[in-house]
Image (spheres, rainbow, N blue to C red):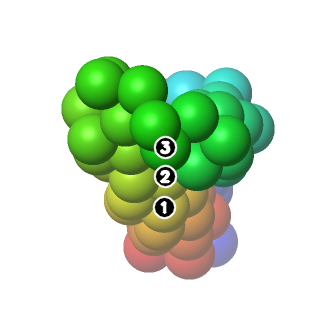
Amino acid sequence: MKHTDRKLLGKGIKNLAGSLPLTVLGPVILYSSFQNQDKPLFIPILILGVLAMFTAIFLIFRGIMIVMKAIFD
């Protein structure tokens, strides 16, 4: 019988925990950017918000894959 790899599980949980603030922060930054379209920093803040959202998606996907690998491998 195989057992769960605790080190790998911890790494996956850390990835998921790291994505949690970005999951909230990305849309907030994006919304803030769209509310201030007439300001000169519109484009950099828009890029920052989109980058935060894509990073959150990547970390969630990677975290779930690592957790699944730790449990079922």
The residue singled out by tag 2 in the image is 53
Disc 3 marks a residue whose amino acid type is: Gln
Vertical order, 4 against 44 (above or below): below
Q: Position of residue 38 (x, y in %)?
A: 46, 37
Q: Earlier in the sequence, mark 3 or mark 2?
A: 3
- Would you say the residues marked 1 and 2 are in contact, meaning their CB atoms lie under 8 Å apart? yes
Name the mark on residue 18: none
The residue singled out by tag 3 in the image is 37
Disc 2 marks a residue whose amino acid type is: Met
Q: Position of residue 14 (x, y in %)?
A: 55, 28
Q: Earlier in the sequence, mark 3 or mark 1?
A: 3
Q: Residue at x 32, y 24 (%)?
A: 41
Disc 1 marks a residue whose amino acid type is: Ile
Nearest the viewer among 46 and 2 is 46
Quadrant housing residue 49: top left
Quadrant housing residue 13: top right
Figure quadrant of the C terminus: bottom left
Give the SS element for disc 2: helix
The residue singled out by tag 1 in the image is 57
